[in-house]
Each structure stands twice: as structure tokens, then as C-alpha cells.
């Protein structure tokens, strides 16, 4: 176990709805990254939060947004859900000490299905 | 363009056999390269992490190599077990302010009895 938890484990939504996914990072970690993984594909980077500020973003539209809280837990919000948003959403926490020590520890993921 | 390419896409081997998975990358400037194991429907779990100066790193039956000159890495699995059936993902991090990481699509390994 990595110490990173995500909730919920599974979620079913319909097109146009909004969803919030949650992640609790490993104790002592200050950085959280979110990834989208479609079936049979590698994870795609959505964005990263470091000390409550967005610190890098992948090629995802603005309807994907996030937050990081003072305790370094995080939320991923997706508005106006589309069918293609169906995927496994992974959260990874890490401790940023220097340029070479960003080993990420992943949570078990949230499986989102959009109908 | 920063990319990570893995081969083969999938692989079937018999229990007890060895196998090698490949990863080629064009990510620059390079920070580190990691191999992850991901069971179906679960989050990836780190196997090895290597920086520019490291050529090889082992974790039990898993041995990763890195050639930073040719930008190639391999993951060798020795004496495979049924529990090795999973996706193996190569991940390369850029040395930028955002620590941007690029994931390969993974190699799906099936170990058969």
C-alpha cells in the first residue's frame, strides 16, 4: 500500500453532469498529480498541485479543474461530463525536495463511467 | 516532441521464463526514468527509479537498465511468475519547474502456466 487513498472507488454519471473526485496524499507529501487513464492506455497527465498552487497542466480543457488543500489533500472536478471522460482517474502524491526526487506514489484510482 | 514509446505492446510468456521490455524516449531535459507495474484496475506501483548517472537498478526479479546516450531503457524480468501478469509502464520525467512526467502506453504482460 502506498498510503494514498482515493474516493469514491467507482462512480457512474450521465453526460452533462459534474463530478468531484478526492485524493488524500501520503503523509509528508506536498505535491499531488492527477492522471486520466483510458482502458488499455497509459495514464495521461491532467495537472499537478504543489503547496496549493497549480504547477503544470496537460492537454485537458478548462472543465477539468482542481484544488489542493492546506493538508495537501486534493480534489479533481470535471464539469459538463462527456462520454469520453469515462476512465480510471489516478492521483499520485510526491515530496518535492529537489529536481531529482519526485518519485510518485499512486492511489488505487477512481473508475468513472459516463453514460 | 517529448514522447515515451514502449515495446512490445503485449507479450505472452510461460511461467518460469525470462523476458525483456523496452522503452525509448525523446524527453528532454531528462530528470529520471521509472518503471511501474500496474495490475488491472489498480494504481501503478513503482518498481525502479533511475537518474541520469545510473545504468542499472534491481528490485528482486526485476532489473532495469538505462542508456542515457541512446535514450533507451529496458526492464528484465527473471523467472516469471503468474503474479507478474500486469501492465508495465515506463515513465520519464522532465527537468522543468513543473516536474512534468510523460507516461508510455505500457506493455501488457501475460504469464501462462
Image: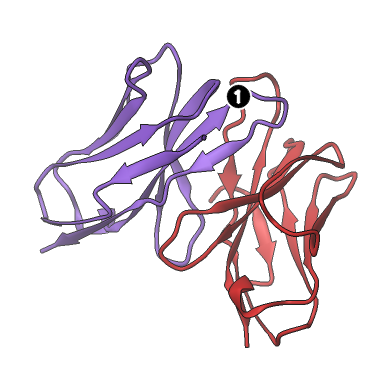
Left or right: B2, with B11 as reference point: right
Quarter-of-image position of residue A104: top right
In the image, the chain rendered in purple is B
Q: Which residue is mark 1?
A: A101
- Residue B58 appears in the picture as rendered: no
Q: Is residue B92 left or right of residue A113?
A: left
User: Of residues B25 and B91, which is closer to you in this image?
Assistant: B25
The residue sitting at the top extreme is B53
B42 in relation to A105, above or below: below
Q: Residue at x 14, y 43 (%)?
A: B79
**B4 horizontally vs A86: left or right:** left
Q: Position of residue A8 (x, y in %)?
A: 68, 72
At x 80% / y 64%, what residue is drawn?
A63
Binning the other alpha carbons within 10 Å of mark 1 as few (below 14), some (14 to 19) or many (20 upward) gives some
Q: Colour of chain A?
A: red
Q: Is residue A83 visible?
A: yes
Amino acid at each position: 500500500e502506498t498510503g494514498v487513498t482515493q474516493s469514491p472507488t467507482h462512480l457512474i454519471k450521465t453526460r452533462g453532469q459534474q463530478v468531484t473526485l478526492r485524493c488524500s496524499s501520503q503523509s509528508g507529501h506536498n505535491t499531488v498529480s492527477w492522471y486520466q487513464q483510458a482502458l488499455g492506455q497509459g495514464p495521461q497527465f491532467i495537472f499537478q498541485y504543489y503547496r496549493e498552487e497549480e504547477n503544470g497542466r496537460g492537454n485537458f480543457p478548462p472543465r477539468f479543474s482542481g484544488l489542493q488543500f492546506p493538508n495537501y489533500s486534493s480534489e479533481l472536478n470535471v464539469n459538463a461530463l462527456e462520454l469520453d471522460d469515462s476512465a480510471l482517474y489516478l492521483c499520485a502524491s510526491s515530496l518535492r525536495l529537489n529536481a531529482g526526487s519526485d518519485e510518485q506514489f499512486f492511489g488505487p484510482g477512481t473508475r468513472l463511467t459516463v453514460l | 516532441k517529448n514522447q515515451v514509446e514502449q515495446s512490445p505492446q503485449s507479450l505472452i510468456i510461460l511461467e518460469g521464463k525470462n523476458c525483456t521490455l523496452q522503452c525509448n524516449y525523446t524527453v528532454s531535459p531528462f530528470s529520471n526514468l521509472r518503471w511501474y507495474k500496474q495490475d488491472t484496475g489498480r494504481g501503478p506501483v513503482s518498481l525502479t527509479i533511475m537518474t541520469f548517472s545510473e545504468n542499472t537498478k534491481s528490485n528482486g526479479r526485476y532489473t532495469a537498465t538505462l542508456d542515457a546516450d541512446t535514450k533507451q531503457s529496458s526492464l528484465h524480468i527473471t523467472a516469471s511468475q503468474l503474479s507478474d501478469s500486469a501492465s508495465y509502464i515506463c515513465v520519464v520525467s522532465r527537468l522543468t519547474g513543473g516536474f512534468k512526467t510523460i507516461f508510455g502506453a505500457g506493455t501488457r504482460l501475460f504469464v501462462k502456466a
